[in-house]
Structure formats: structure tokens, C-alpha cells
Image (cartoon, helix red, strand yellow):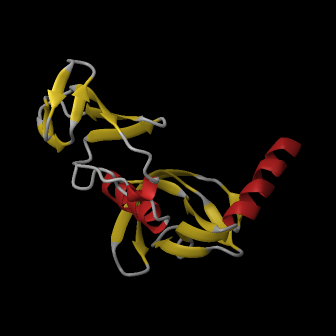
Amino acid sequence: MAHRETRLQGRKSVLGVQVRLEPDAVGRTPWRFGEGRRATSSWWREDIHLETAVAVATYRGGLLDGQAAVLENAYGAGKVVYVATLLDDETFSSVLLGAVESAGVENAFDGVPAHIECAVRRNDTTEFVFLLNHSGDVATTVSVAGRDLLTDAAVTDNITLAPLQAAVIQRNIRMVPPSRRQYR
């Protein structure tokens, strides 16, 4: 029991909430963001009571009517966004992207569809762009230049990824601060 209490105390200090109950849920529960946008959740819902956190969305109806479903809390130099339920895919994407944008994280591949996974790894002289098409039926073109290490082909302006295809694009870089790097 001491381990669980320690875990909850850590959650309380970071999230600015007190967790009183973590009930299993049956069915779908509606809820609403502060600006009026609606969504649904399923599987589980946590009964959380705000202390320093602010509700971004609240449950509508049921035992948790009016309780926070998504919250924000200032922590250190930033903020924590916590989701106290299982969201539908569209809403989860919206909440996640909103948190990433508000943290000032730049999107190196703006406009690339959600089914394309993009990751960048770099050292002092070289950048590696990993692209994975998770769609089983949609080919997608991504603007990027370099050398595809999987095919050893030069990529001059863009690459088209067939369904379920991957590419690793190697690019030489000058030592430019990350905030000033330009992606194509």
C-alpha cells in the first residue's frame, strides 16, 4: 500500500489533482471541452478532484458529471496535460497535438498525414529522417531530400512511400541551432 500512496502523491504534486477513485467504466461517456467541443470516452474514467490544476474538458452525465476529463497544471517551467479517460482517436490526436504545440515543439513535417510516422535523429554532421507509412492501402508523398539508406537512392525533392513502406533519409547538416533548421 505504501508504494501506491507514494505513486499517488507523485501524481498529486505534478498534476495538481487528488485521485479518489479509478472506476472501471461500461459504455461510452460524453464530455465537453470548455469552448463547447464535444467528445466521448470509454473503458475507464478517473474520478479526480482538482487542487492546482484546471479542467480543460469535463464529463457530462453519469456519476462523474462535471468532473475533469482532461486537465492542465503548471509544473516547473512548463505544464502537464493529463487525460483521465480513454479518448476516441480524433479527440486524442487533438489533445496531444494541442499539448505539443503549446509546448513550442516545432513540427518538422507539417502537413504529413497521421498515418506517416516521422522521426529525426542527428549527430554533429548527419541527420537521419525515419519515415514509416502505417497505412495498408494509401501511398503518400513526403517532401524531403537526401539519400535513402534502405534503397541507396538519391532523394532530391520528395519520396513516395507505398503502403507499409519505410525509408531512412540521410542528410548532411551544418551545425545550425535546432530552432533554425529548415525541413523540406
Q: Residue at x 57, y 69 (%)?
A: 72
Left or right of 65? Residue 49 is right
Report whether 123 appears left or right of 40. Answer: right
Which picture quadrant has residue 158?
A: top left
Q: Quadrant of residue 40?
A: bottom left
- In the image, farthest residue toward the bottom: 35
Image height of 5 relative to 91, above or below: above
Q: How many marks?
A: 0
Q: Is residue 16 visible?
A: yes
x, y (%) of residue 5?
83, 50
Give the residue furthest to the front: 174
| Viewer-proximal residue among 29 and 112 | 112
Q: Residue at x 64, y 71 (%)?
A: 74
Q: Residue at x 25, y 19 (%)?
A: 150
Q: Quadrant of the N terminus?
A: top right
What percent of the width, then of the height, locates residue 96? 43, 57
Image side of residue 49 versus residue 42, left or right: right
